[in-house]
Each structure stands twice: as structure tokens, then as C-alpha cells.
Image (cartoon, rainbow, N blue to C red):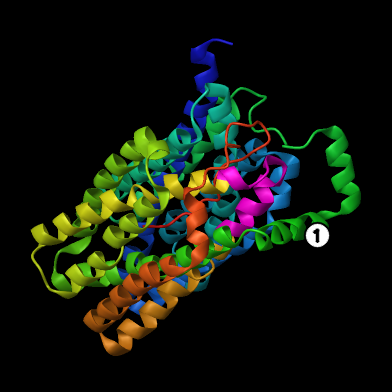
């Protein structure tokens, strides 16, 4: 196989991730802003975020065995197509004067429920594509992280500008187009052998006899033997909850109360995303030479509390952009490091199950983030909530680091290039961090 052909699967997976994640970032701005300006209710804004992320977490947790058995390729393109249809339905029903708030919640739940397995499927395909390309594990996860960060840069900037110019509902049509394009890339651009079920025919037959729930339970059994992974998941779960509150409620309320508007949301997201791309690219090139634990905690120190505190200080927009850029640079190192650790420790035949469980546990608090923030901001005001969340972020990412299992993070297993071993749980689990 030529080098160009061997790089095709990795390029295809990264391209599909880029367009679908860009759409996700656009809708993450457009939907909350649409609800906030039409209802003037932080509580309803948080409720919409809850109805999107709760199905994401639940469905993603339950579809791990399905991804292992059916194959990530099929799951990816079908769920992206479902997301595109549900997103396009929002402006359509609004134009027909049929978009009640309960119907909006239903459509948002479908979007979130389809995104979960779709994101998981793309994550699962990364290690296989990296093997075909002969790319180091840390480099592949770094490229995946850079792709996510690039989407986090383009999405908010484009979304904020388009919302200001054309309105949030028009921007949702762009989001639907991104999901549809991601589906086409996976279905048509990847070689057919990429993204097939991890198990061979005999293994699949054995798992059929074992049953779905037994396979599902095997993922929990594996995680119980990995204290490092469990600690990472708990820590990322808390920070993801705080990030969800920040993104879905605190940022839109700050933009509205400060008079900066949706354009400021796009600018801050763009500054953070651009710096995060730089951090992810550096991680892709040099992560295999760095001490993972040091990089991990330094990244969280920059990425977390400063964002909350700068908004609470009523600083000018230029200072806010500078702090967000520094935070983004730190955040860019997080997912490549976490991804490499997870891939090394999870056998490939169990990748879908363990990744889905890790992602879902790490994301379990996200549905509550916007819901709680919306209710608390309505009663206590924006600044006190920003200060409390910033302090909680700082304490979480520092106190957890005192636990002894973190020493395992710097001990590479040497298994990452073996064909039987997988990709990251997204903290994309999304043991991925959402910063």
C-alpha cells in the first residue's frame, strides 16, 4: 500500500470530525442564543442545554457494544444524517409557526441522542486509521485534538458572526449542512475496510450468545480494574460540568449583560480555539517526549479557573480575549495526553464499550451544568456564580492530583502500536475535556 493510500483513512476520519464538530460548535452558540433572545429566560436556556446533553450521555453509554458489533463506520454516517435532519427541522417548524417550546426540546433531544454514538464512532476509528498511516499514537491523538480545537475555533467565530448578521435559525441550517457533509465523507470517502466491527466472525458469534448486557457489563468490569482511568473520568466529569455551565449559560448571559453580544462569544471562542489548535499541534509533535502528568495538570491550571475569573472582573474585551487565548493554549494539551493514556490501556475489541462508558461517565454532569447554572444565575446573579465555579475548578484540578495513581500516567505501556489496542475515550472521554 502506498503512503498516500495509507494516509487516506486518517485524513477521512479527521475531515469528518472537523465538519461535524464545527456544526456542533455552531449550534452550541446558535441554540442558546435563540432561546435567550426569544424567551429572555436563563432557566429555559439551561433547560435546552439539558435536553441536548442528557440524551447524548445516555445514548452514548448504551451504544458502546453496538459500535463494537456493527462497526463505527455505519454508526457514524447514519447518526450524522439523523442529526442533520433534526437540526434542519428547527428552522423549518419555526417558519411554519409550529415550533413550540416542547417541540424544540424534543428536536434538541434527538440531536443530542444522535451526536453521542456519532462522536464515539469517529473516535473509535482514529487508532485504526493511525495504524494504517504508520503514525505514532500520541501524534494521532494530537492531530485529533487539533482537529477538535480547530472546529472549536472556526465554529464560534463563524457562528457568532452569522448569528449577528443572519440570526440563529439561519445558522442552524449551516449546522445541518455540516452534519450532512460529515455523513457523506464517512460513507463515501473512506476505504470500505476502515471502520468494520472490531471482532472477527467467530468472536461476533460468541458475543451474540453472551448477549448485549453481558458485553455492556464487561466495560464496567474493565474500568474497575483501572484506578487511573477512573480518577481521570471523575476529575474530567467535574470540570466538564463546570464547562457546560460556562458555555451554555454563563457566557451568553455575560455577553448579553455586558452589551458585547453574540459577536463577543464568537471572538472569545475563536481566541481560545486558535490557541488550543497551537497547543494541540505542539502536543502532536512532542507529546511522546513530555512528562504527561506535568503537562496534564499545567494544562488544566491554564484552561480552567482563569476564564471564570476574568468574566467576573468586568475586564475590557481585550483582556478577556488574552485570558481566553492562554486558557486555550493549555487546553490544547489535555485531550492528546488523556487519549494516549486511554488507548494504551484498553484492548481494541473492548474499545467501543469502554470508550462509551468513559465518555458518558465523564459527561454525566454536563446536562446538569446548564440547568443548575440557569437556575442559580436567575436567583443569585452572574458574578457570584462565576466566582464559585472558578474556585471549584481550581480546587478540583489541584486536589485530585495528590492521589497516588497519577504516577501511572507517566508509565507508557508500550502497547500503543499493537493492532489489538484502541483509541481514546473522548474526554471528543470525551473522557475528553470540553474546555
Q: Position of residue 240 (x, y in %)?
A: 43, 65
Which residues, given as a range, are shown in magenta?
A: 343-359
Location of mark 1 (residue): 213
Which residue ends up furthest to the right in the rendered image? 209
Q: Considering the image in quadrants, where does the C terminus appear?
A: bottom left
Residue at 37% x, 65% y is: 243
Q: Is residue 40 visible?
A: no
Q: Quadrant of residue 249?
A: bottom left
Closer to us: 377 or 215: 215
Give yes or no for residue 109 being in the magenta stretch: no
* Rendered position, 297 above or below 352: below
Left or right, 54 with respect to 203, comes to: left
Residue at 55% x, 48% y is: 342
Q: Considering the image in quadrants, where does the N terminus appear?
A: top right
Which residue ends up furthest to the top in the rendered image? 2
Closer to us: 397 or 249: 397
Left or right, 345 with respect to 373, comes to: right
* Rendered position, 368 above or below 225: below
Q: Position of residue 396 (x, y in %)?
A: 39, 72
Number of marks in the image? Answer: 1
Left or right, 399 with respect to 412, comes to: left
* Rendered position, 312 above or below 148: below
Q: Secondary structure at mark 1?
A: helix
Residue at 21% x, 67% y is: 255
Residue at 50% x, 37% y is: 182
Q: Is residue 204 visible?
A: yes
Q: Quadrant of residue 374?
A: bottom left
Give yes or no for residue 351 being in the magenta stretch: yes
Closer to us: 410 or 304: 410
Amino acid at each position: 500500500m502506498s503512503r498516500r493510500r495509507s494516509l487516506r483513512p486518517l485524513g477521512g476520519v479527521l475531515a469528518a470530525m472537523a465538519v461535524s464538530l464545527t456544526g456542533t460548535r455552531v449550534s452550541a452558540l446558535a441554540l442558546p442564543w435563540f432561546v435567550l433572545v426569544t424567551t429572555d429566560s436563563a432557566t429555559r436556556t439551561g433547560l435546552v442545554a439539558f435536553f441536548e446533553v442528557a440524551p447524548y450521555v445516555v445514548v452514548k453509554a448504551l451504544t458502546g457494544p453496538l459500535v463494537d458489533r456493527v462497526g463505527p463506520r455505519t454508526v457514524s454516517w447514519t447518526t450524522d444524517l439523523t442529526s442533520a435532519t433534526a437540526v434542519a427541522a428547527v428552522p423549518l417548524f419555526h417558519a411554519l409557526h409550529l415550533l413550540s417550546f416542547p417541540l424544540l426540546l424534543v428536536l434538541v433531544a434527538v440531536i443530542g441522542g444522535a451526536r453521542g454514538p456519532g462522536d464515539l464512532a469517529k473516535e473509535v476509528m482514529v487508532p485504526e486509521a493511525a495504524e494504517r498511516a504508520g503514525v505514532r499514537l500520541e501524534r494521532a491523538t494530537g492531530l485529533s485534538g487539533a482537529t477538535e480545537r480547530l472546529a472549536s475555533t472556526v465554529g464560534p467565530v463563524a457562528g457568532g458572526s452569522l448569528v449577528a448578521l443572519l440570526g440563529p435559525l439561519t445558522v442552524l441550517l449551516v449546522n445541518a449542512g455540516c452534519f450532512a457533509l460529515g455523513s457523506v465523507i464517512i460513507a463515501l470517502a473512506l476505504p470500505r475496510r476502515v471502520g468494520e466491527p472490531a471482532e472477527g466472525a467467530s468472536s461476533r458469534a460468541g458475543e451474540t450468545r453472551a448477549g448485549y448486557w453481558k458485553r455492556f457489563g464487561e466495560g464496567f468490569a474493565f474500568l474497575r480494574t483501572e484506578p487511573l482511568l477512573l480518577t481521570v473520568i471523575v476529575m474530567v466529569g467535574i470540570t466538564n460540568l463546570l464547562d457546560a455551565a460556562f458555555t451554555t449559560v454563563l457566557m451568553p448571559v455575560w455577553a448579553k449583560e455586558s452589551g458585547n453580544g453574540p459577536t463577543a462569544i464568537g471572538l472569545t471562542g475563536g481566541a481560545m480555539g486558535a490557541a488550543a489548535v497551537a497547543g494541540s499541534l505542539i502536543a502532536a509533535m512532542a507529546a511522546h517526549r513530555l512528562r504527561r502528568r506535568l503537562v496534564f495538570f499545567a494544562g488544566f491550571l491554564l484552561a480552567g479557573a482563569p476564564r471564570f475569573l476574568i468574566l467576573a472582573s468586568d475586564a475590557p474585551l481585550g483582556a478577556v480575549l488574552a485570558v481566553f487565548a492562554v486558557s486555550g493554549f493549555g487546553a490544547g494539551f489535555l485531550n492528546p495526553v488523556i487519549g494516549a493514556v486511554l488507548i494504551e490501556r484498553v484492548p481494541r475489541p473492548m474499545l467501543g464499550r469502554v470508550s462509551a462508558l468513559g465518555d458518558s461517565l465523564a459527561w454525566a454532569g454536563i446536562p446538569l451544568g446548564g440547568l443548575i447554572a440557569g437556575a442559580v444565575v436567575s436567583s443569585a446573579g452572574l458574578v457570584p456564580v462565576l466566582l464559585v465555579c472558578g474556585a471549584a475548578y481550581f480546587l478540583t484540578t489541584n486536589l485530585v492530583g495528590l492521589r497516588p495513581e497519577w504516577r501511572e500516567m507517566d508509565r507508557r505501556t508500550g502497547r500503543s502500536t499493537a493492532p489489538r489496542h484502541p483509541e481514546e475515550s473522548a474526554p471528543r472521554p470525551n473522557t475528553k475535556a470540553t474546555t
